[in-house]
Image (cartoon, grey):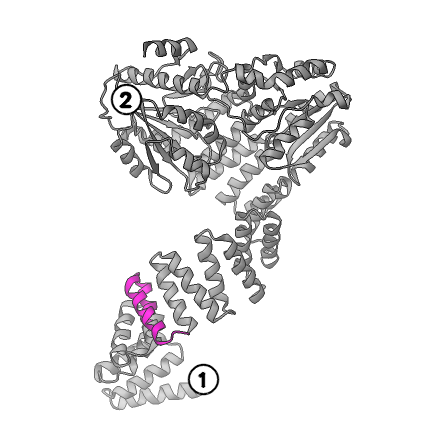
């Protein structure tokens, strides 16, 4: 065949030499050269034929295909249009024109041509695929998905269409249907590696972790060193509480590419899970050098560090590094604020949060907002940085005079919005937690900015003027040097609203058991190796006691059991309970006499729930601000005797409680009365404190004074009421 084609080419060349203006000879030579894959020469011959004899209309479709193959899309489009002048009903020509128009990023005419091709051949899957490609180019994801569904109906075995539909559904976050597509793809083409990867991603999003692990392992069976498969499998194993296995996989990825930012970021989180915060910090800094979203990556690292690092100097220095990198470039661009400086006028107050849904932050702030919304001193604005909405979101909307969805909007756009809204005081409710907008606040869109509730540490930024707290959450002089913000101490930093369906408090279990049962309901990733050693020391000091560990997941329980075994604590002394819903979680406290708090991040919500169920918490004082959460709640309830200075005092307190069950029983039966007699159940106190603190901030700004520590006492609130 090759020899025959060569002979034909030679024959046509001789014909052209004999008559250089023989258009048909040029045409035949061009066709033969294209068959020989000599595209450049073939296209040139066809173009010469059309120059000599423009009426050779049949050459236009062939020439268009050759030009397209050469990447000469403008010329190809012109040839397709010329061909369609003679063959307007040819679906393949309309499809070809659509393809080259897509290459030229002319998606609107590309879609028109594709739709015309599909009209001419309505049941042709390839024509519909061309329509889907143009719709995708226009960014119309819903239309693309609808067209691809039609393709898959017409051609159920079409591999590419099945893959494209699954990928499009992922973009729509329709992970159930997307996963079904990728499962179908596995049936059609078992060795489709990208399909196995994407199935794993969908299953991960659906929190079907075991199935996701299997899918990623199938992808790795096809390509053992595929970086994405190794990385994502490591992420699944981390979520399955198997950080040692995740660590080994990430080592493989980083051996292949030491600058893989995603692998570095995952390695950082895994090292934190393995209680090696120094290595976690090391990998986090490397990830920052390569990450596509470095500010959010930096915040995530700081959040983990706040849960792991017990060194206040390191913790503060790392938060300042965030400001040095992401806030410093904004400082020269700060612009003056035109807000009316009347010291007594009603204030426009904005709240920025990514947690306006069923979240601890929302549960803390909702009762306060319910009071503040009736105030004539403040007008409340919400700036929600999450598209997630639920019944809590709907209730929260009712507490704000103005609600703004800022998720997906850039900082420049939101800054203009905040300035246009005339916000006087902007309050961040996230700190360095997920979905924060600290880079927005770094621009100083409001004259006064504060942070509250969402994060235990400093933001590290100059743009945030104040940190809202109370005398127990941030005792005067104790943590001041760990904050760039000025501390505002109110009578109550935030109230606690117990679950309205919480079961009644039961009798102290130790009275029937004859031994003390300690308990923990904290997240497993807060229970580091040092925490387990600390608790094991307590268990050895109270040798007949047991420890209930709630919220356990496979993997986490295995690791914790191994650590307790290393500390000489027998398995039968440990009671493992799985993660359950709120009602069952609260009821589980019926088995516990005394709860234990981890460190360095003690938390407050879990401790508050336990206290509402009549169960006090043993905690120690630490050197960093995140250590203070448990002590804050206990102090407000008059239970400071449960706060130990060190491990020795901690163990001694446990021994005392074990020999005095009657005292524990009495405390348990009166615990809810303690709540009633404390400030914790009075959101109006927090609301009044916030309102007065905001007024002090505002008056300082109106007088041209810099931010300074503010103290609002309970007596001040009484004086305000009398004055009103």
Q: Which residues are magenta?
A: 96-123
The mark closer to the camera, 2 or 1, is 2
Residue 456 belongs to magenta span: no
Of the image marks 2 and 1, the number of the one nearer the N terminus: 1
| Looking at the image, residue 425 lies above or below residue 286 | above
Q: Is residue 121 left or right of residue 256?
A: left
Residue 99 belongs to magenta span: yes
Task: Indicate the quadrant where residue 480 lies.
Answer: top left
User: Please, what secondary structure does the residue beneath circle 1 have?
Assistant: helix
Quarter in which the C terminus is drawn = top left
User: Please, what secondary structure does the residue beneath circle 2 have?
Assistant: loop
Q: Most prominent secondary structure in the magenta stretch?
A: helix
Tell me the residue that label 2 is attached to. 346
Q: Position of residue 498 (x, y in %)?
A: 54, 26
465 or 68, nearer to the observer = 465
Q: Position of residue 66 (x, y in %)?
A: 34, 74
Residue 414 visible, this orientation: yes
688 or 169, nearer to the observer = 688
Q: Is residue 608 left or right of residue 172?
A: right
Label 2 crowd bin: few (<14), some (14–19), many (20+), radius 10 Å: some
What residue do we see at 55% from left, 45% from top?
A: 254
What residue do we see at 58% from left, 13% from top?
A: 640
Tell me the residue that label 1 is attached to. 2
Say which mark, if any, is on residue 531: none
């Amino acid at each position: 065949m090759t020899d025959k084609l060569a002979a034909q080419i030679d024959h046509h060349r001789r014909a052209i030499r004999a008559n250089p203006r023989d258009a048909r000879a040029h045409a035949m030579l061009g066709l033969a050269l294209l068959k020989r894959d000599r595209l450049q020469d073939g296209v040139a011959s066809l173009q010469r034929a059309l120059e000599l004899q423009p009426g050779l209309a049949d050459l236009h479709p062939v020439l268009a295909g050759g030009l397209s193959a050469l990447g000469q899309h403008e010329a190809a489009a012109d040839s397709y249009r010329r061909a369609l002048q003679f063959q307007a009903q040819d679906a393949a020509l309309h499809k070809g024109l659509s393809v080259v128009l897509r290459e030229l990023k002319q998606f609107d005419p590309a879609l028109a041509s594709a739709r015309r091709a599909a009209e001419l051949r309505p049941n042709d899957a390839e024509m519909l695929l061309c329509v889907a490609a143009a719709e995708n180019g226009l960014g119309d994801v819903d239309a693309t998905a609808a067209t691809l569904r039609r393709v898959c109906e017409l051609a159920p075995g079409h591999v590419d269409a099945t893959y494209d539909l699954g990928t499009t559904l992922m973009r729509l976050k329709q992970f159930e249907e997307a996963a079904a597509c990728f499962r179908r793809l596995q049936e059609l083409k078992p060795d489709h590696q990208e399909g196995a990867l994407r199935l794993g991603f969908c299953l991960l999003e659906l929190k079907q972790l075991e199935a996701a692990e299997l899918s990623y392992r199938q992808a790795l069976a096809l390509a053992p060193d595929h970086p994405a498969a190794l990385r994502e499998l490591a992420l699944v194993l981390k979520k399955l509480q198997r950080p040692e296995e995740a660590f080994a996989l990430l080592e493989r990825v980083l051996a292949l590419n030491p600058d893989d930012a995603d692998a570095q970021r995952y390695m950082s989180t895994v090292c934190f899970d393995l209680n090696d915060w120094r290595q976690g910090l090391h990998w986090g800094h490397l990830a920052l050098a390569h990450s596509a979203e470095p500010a959010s990556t930096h915040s995530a690292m700081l959040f983990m560090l706040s849960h792991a690092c017990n060194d206040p100097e390191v913790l503060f220095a790392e938060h300042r590094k965030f400001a040095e990198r992401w806030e410093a470039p904004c400082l020269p661009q700060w612009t003056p604020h035109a807000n009316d400086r009347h010291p007594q006028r009603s204030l426009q107050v904005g709240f920025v949060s990514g947690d306006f849904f069923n979240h601890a932050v929302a549960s803390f702030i909702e009762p306060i907002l319910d009071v503040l919304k009736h105030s004539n001193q403040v007008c409340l604005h919400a700036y929600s940085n999450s598209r997630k909405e639920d019944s809590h979101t709907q209730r929260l909307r009712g507490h704000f005079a103005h609600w703004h969805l800022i998720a997906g909007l850039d900082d420049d756009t939101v800054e203009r919005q905040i300035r246009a809204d005339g916000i006087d005081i902007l309050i961040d409710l996230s700190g360095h937690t997920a979905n924060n907008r600290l880079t927005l606040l770094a621009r100083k869109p409001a004259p006064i900015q504060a942070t509250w509730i969402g994060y235990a540490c400093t933001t590290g930024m100059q743009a945030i003027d104040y940190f809202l707290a109370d005398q127990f959450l941030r005792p005067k002089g104790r943590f001041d040097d760990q904050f760039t913000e000025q501390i505002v101490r109110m009578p109550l930093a935030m109230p606690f609203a117990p679950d309205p369906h919480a079961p009644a408090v039961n009798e102290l279990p130790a009275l029937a058991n004859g031994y003390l049962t300690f308990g923990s309901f904290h997240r497993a990733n807060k229970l580091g190796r040092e925490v387990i050693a600390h608790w094991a020391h307590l268990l050895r000091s109270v040798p007949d006691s047991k420890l209930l560990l709630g919220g356990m997941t496979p993997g986490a329980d295995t690791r914790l059991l191994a650590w307790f075994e290393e500390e000489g604590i027998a398995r039968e002394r440990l009671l493992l309970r799985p993660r359950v819903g709120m009602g069952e979680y609260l009821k589980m406290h019926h088995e516990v006499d005394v709860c234990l708090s981890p460190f360095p991040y003690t938390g407050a919500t879990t401790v508050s729930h336990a206290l509402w169920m009549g169960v006090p918490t043993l905690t120690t004082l630490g050197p960093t601000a995140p250590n203070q959460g448990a002590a804050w709640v206990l102090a407000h309830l008059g239970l400071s005797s449960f706060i130990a200075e060190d491990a020795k005092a901690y163990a001694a307190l446990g021994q005392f409680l074990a020999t005095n069950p009657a005292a524990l029983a009495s405390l348990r039966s009166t615990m809810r009365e303690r709540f009633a007699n404390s400030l914790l159940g009075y959101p109006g106190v927090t609301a009044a404190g916030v309102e007065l603190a905001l007024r002090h901030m505002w008056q300082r700004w109106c007088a041209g004074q810099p931010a300074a520590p503010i103290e609002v006492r309970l007596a001040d609130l009484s004086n305000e009421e009398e004055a009103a």
